[in-house]
Image (cartoon, rainbow, N blue to C red):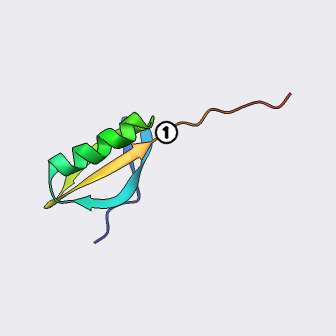
Amino acid sequence: MEPALSKKCHGKKFMWDGQSYETGEAALEAAETYKKEGFEIETVAEGDRYLVYTRRVSAVHSQN
């Protein structure tokens, strides 16, 4: 069964990065890369694999 494409954590919507990681360490390493790029991250253990969910709020620019 495929993981959920999105997940609510702390009232916020996170999107799965599409990868399944064999170890928690590998998932955390990927998560740190996303974090450095400005994403909020959540890691989830699901069965024998680990998943990374990300979210980033884009700034809205008003047109004047």
Give the crowd class for mark 1: few <14, some 14-19, many >=20 residues within 10 Å.
some
Across and down, in percent, residue 53 comes to: 36, 48
Question: Is residue 11 something one can see in this rendering?
Answer: no
Across and down, in percent, residue 13 comes to: 45, 44
| Amino acid marked by disc 1 | Arg
> In the image, what residue occupies the spot 38% across and 42% down?
34
Res 11 quadrant in image: top left
Is residue 1 toward the left or the right of residue 16 in the image?
left
Is residue 35 toward the left or the right of residue 51 in the image?
right
User: Where's the C terminus, which quadrant?
Assistant: top right
Is residue 39 toward the left or the right of residue 21 in the image?
right
Question: Is residue 5 something one can see in this rendering?
Answer: yes
Across and down, in percent, residue 49 comes to: 18, 59
Q: In the image, is residue 49 above or below residue 38? A: below
Considering the numbered disc 1 on the image, is that residue within a helix, a strand or a loop? Answer: loop
Res 46 quadrant in image: bottom left
> In the image, what residue occupies the spot 34% across and 42% down?
33
> In the image, what residue occupies the spot 38% across and 55% down?
17
Q: In the image, is residue 59 above or below residue 24? A: above
> In the image, what residue occupies the spot 32% across and 60% down?
19
Res 50 quadrant in image: bottom left
| Residue indicated by mark 1 | 56
Q: Nearer the viewer, residue 23 or 51?
A: 23
User: Where's the N terminus, which quadrant?
Assistant: bottom left
